[in-house]
Amino acid sequence: MRPRSAVVLVGGPAVYAGHALAERPRILLPVGEHPLLSYLAINLREAGVERLIVCHTPSTEEYRKGLERALAEIPVKLDVILRETMLGTGGSVKQVSDLLRGEPFWVIGGDSYMRADLSEMLSVHRSAGGLATLAAVRLQTPPWQMERVEANEQMSVRTIHRMHPAEEKRSTLRPITLYLFEPAALDLIPPNSYYDLKEQLFAQLHETGRPAAVWVVPEHARTLVSVDEYFAANQDFLLGRVKFPELALSAALAKKPEQDFIGPVALRNGARIGSNALVVGPAVLEECEIGAGSVLVESVVLRGARIGRGAQINHCLVGEDAVVEDGVVLRDMIVPRKGRISAKIAQATPGERQTRTFAPSLLWIDLDAPGRTAYRLIKRAIDILFALTALFLLSPILLLIAIIVMLDSPGAAFYTQTRCGRNGRPFPMVKFRTMVSNADDLKRELQELNEVDGPTFKLTADPRVTRIGKILRDTNLDEVPQLINVLNGEMSLIGPRPLSMDEMCYNPVWRDARLAFTPGLTGPWQVEAHSKALFSEWIRYDLFYVQNASGSLDTRIFLRSLTRFASDVFDFLWMKKKRKF
């Protein structure tokens, strides 16, 4: 049976290189004169798709209305259903399983740009006879990019490797977000849980003896996850490397005066171009304003943006409602949504620009902006003062707990585990040991009993927990030794909780954002929901903190953490007292 439905996974507002560019998602950014969605719809319609099920993340009303308008304007006739989801790629597909009619279905990412005959992928899928087939592109790394310097920890050179591509042992196939599934694949996805297709489902298929097939796209495919890929997609279309006859450049462009345009330019209705302005393509101009005498070379300017008189913009991406003031010269830069670039900012030295800290794929965090530097310094001073005072006052109690832990079960008093610090730097997080010494080995046997979704593991009645360990966990005293990590600067009192890289792999956006901050002894998820929240809620709480971190927010989280700690100790003592009677 030919798949008649396609699930389109749409992310949040468009972000590139840490800069928020638009309120709309990437699938609505222009490629040529049309949104990326139009190209996806044409490929799917040619493959026999009759209905699009568009899954988007919760967002603003403006975002939703823009998505609805774009869906109504796609150039091919398709039934469209809009659904709000936030449970990962697999969890989102599971949430719309009632709409898939028990038939095979496509899943495609909202940042995929391709020109391919999907009937070939369908043939591969049928021949394999499996539950799933994924699409991939073959990477071709030129020899000069395969040179590597091997050095030791002291950065002393050992040797220089000059590999030939034939010596490359790693796979040259890179997946793109395009899948074809049989309905039975949905049975492997747990309901109402955060679940990732790439990280979880395909591994599960292999482990159960039902490996998925792979189809290498023979024509043209890009995943627009970077600015370079986005620019390349526009060049591919504007220079005729990829042809969509239904979406050819408007003939009206040819009627523009030659002094206005050189090379292919996609011009949306409403773009205003001043006198003596020069636009050199390939370039894309939405409903924007280009000042008189300005020069625009191979750039993309989104709607509402304004380029000042006499400005020179070369290979730049200008976000919605951004302003580039008169006379500014920019090259190879991103101007974020509602950003304003003056001549003073544009002429900053490269070293000054590098003081900005980026959280890739999510948002731009300028930790050195006015107020941010003071916040960071004051936060660190409080961390040191609090950790020193608490460790001094609690040292007799901590020594007593350490002795009790060792007497209760064989093993050391403390347990260390490698976690990710700021910018992904690993560090040994320390806590009181609350489990038997071979707990990590036993975890593999208990994995199927996991009570939480996503990549984390938790059991309410974990058989690995010791008697004293249960008390320490119930009262949160097992976490107190992490004050040593706070003192060392590896952790802060407040911040996203430190996790291993494996526990963050299912959501790179969330991972990269939280790693822009020093991890905390306590954080927003701990005080808001703790173990009762879905993984998607954990993501939501952490992202809120990253985007709104401040002294007042830290104070609220700290006070709520103290309240929770006191409540946990009281509950433990009260329950112990009740058990006596």
Image (tube, helix red, strand yellow):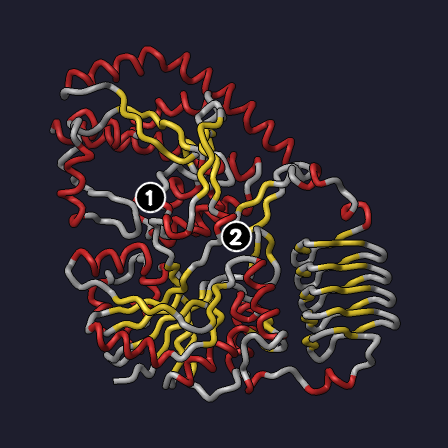
In which quadrant of the rendered image does the C terminus lie?
top left
The residue sitting at 35% across, 59% down in the picture is 87
The residue positioned 53% from the left and 65% from the top of the image is 25
Q: Amino acid at mark 2?
A: Leu
Tell me what residue is drawn at x 44 percent, y 33 percent.
150
Above or below residue 265? Residue 514 is above
Q: What label does residue 502 carry, if any?
A: 1
The three-letter amino acid code for the residue at tag 1 is Asp
Q: Quadrant of residue 426?
A: top left
Give the percent coordinates (x, y) of residue 234: 60, 69
Helix, strand or loop status at disc 2 = loop
Q: Which mark is residue 527?
A: none
Q: x and y percent of residue 295 in the render?
A: 80, 64
Query: Mark 2, residues whose alpha carbon is within 10 Å: few (<14), some, or many (≥20)?
Result: many
Marks 2 and 1 close (CB-CB < 8 Å): no
Q: Is 134 or 34 nearer to us in this picture?
A: 134
Identify the disc placed on residue 362: 2
Across and down, in percent, residue 513 comes to 49, 46
